[in-house]
Image (cartoon, helix red, strand yellow):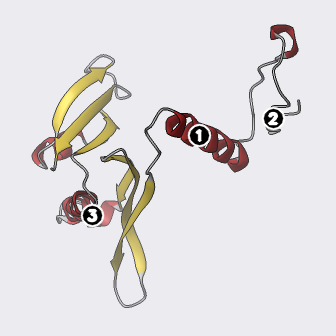
């Protein structure tokens, strides 16, 4: 299999017939294939996948300049925030909190009970605590700028 190629199934395989290789250039087709298979797996077990994507942009000025945004996904009544960013110049003015509140309200309107996210220690763990999130765990030494903190917030 060449890098970037998808793994396809032609039926039951013997263990010796399966190879595992790094996909050096991510291919959106692989993600779509895996998601489709996970959806089928969930449906077979009586838990049909109900996911949908979230994208919220913070836009400044009449020219529509994007100064920040938030992306995530909602599934099984849980919102997972993937990315959130506010341009440096606009930080400290409440835009990040407005983005979070907008995403939380959207998720709550769809019946979500919790929001989940993670951040690194060099990013903004204190920001999320101020916004009502609760720290679940930190992986790594507290002095490590790459220590990852997992947080949640009950919204419903």
Identified at 62% across, 44% down, the residue is 36
Q: Quadrant of residue 54?
A: bottom left
Query: How dense is the environment of label 1, judged by Cα within 10 Å: few (below 14), some, or many (20 and up)?
Result: some
Q: Position of residue 83 (x, y in %)?
A: 40, 50
Q: What whole-number distance in Å separates the C-alpha atoms at marks 2 and 1? A: 16 Å
Q: Nearer the viewer, residue 29 or 123?
A: 29
Check whether the beta carbons of the residues at disc 2 and disc 3 lie within 8 A of each other: no
Query: How dense is the environment of label 3, judged by Cα within 10 Å: few (below 14), some, or many (20 and up)?
Result: some
Check whether the beta carbons of the residues at disc 3 and disc 1 lie within 8 A of each other: no
Residue under label 1: 40
Q: What whole-number distance in Å separates the C-alpha atoms at marks 2 and 3? A: 37 Å
Q: What whole-number distance in Å separates the C-alpha atoms at marks 3 and 1? A: 26 Å
Q: Is residue 92 left or right of residue 116?
A: left
Q: Quadrant of residue 17?
A: top right
Q: Which mark is residue 8?
A: 2
Query: Which callout, 2 or 1, points at the residue further toward the start of the chain?
Result: 2
Q: Is residue 59 left or right of residue 39?
A: left
Q: Nearer the viewer, residue 116 or 47?
A: 47
Identified at 77% across, 20% down, the residue is 20
Q: Is residue 107 left or right of residue 40?
A: left
Residue under label 3: 106
Query: Which of labels 2 and 1 is toward the front?
Result: 1
Vertical side of 31 occupied by 72: above or below: below
């Amino acid at each position: 299999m060449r890098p970037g190629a998808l793994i396809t199934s032609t039926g039951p395989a013997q263990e010796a017939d399966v190879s595992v290789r790094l996909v050096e250039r991510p291919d959106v087709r692989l993600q779509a294939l895996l998601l489709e298979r996970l959806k089928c797996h969930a449906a077979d077990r009586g838990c049909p996948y109900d996911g949908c994507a979230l994208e919220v942009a913070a836009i400044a000025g009449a020219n529509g300049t994007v100064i920040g945004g938030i992306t995530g996904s909602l599934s099984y009544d849980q919102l997972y925030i993937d990315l959130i960013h506010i341009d440096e110049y606009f930080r400290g003015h409440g835009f990040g909190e407005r983005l979070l509140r907008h995403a939380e309200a959207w998720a709550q309107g769809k019946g979500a009970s919790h929001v989940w996210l993670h951040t690194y220690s060099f990013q903004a763990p204190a920001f999320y605590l101020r916004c009502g999130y609760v720290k679940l765990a930190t992986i790594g030494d507290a002095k490590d700028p790459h220590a990852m903190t997992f947080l949640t917030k009950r919204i419903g």
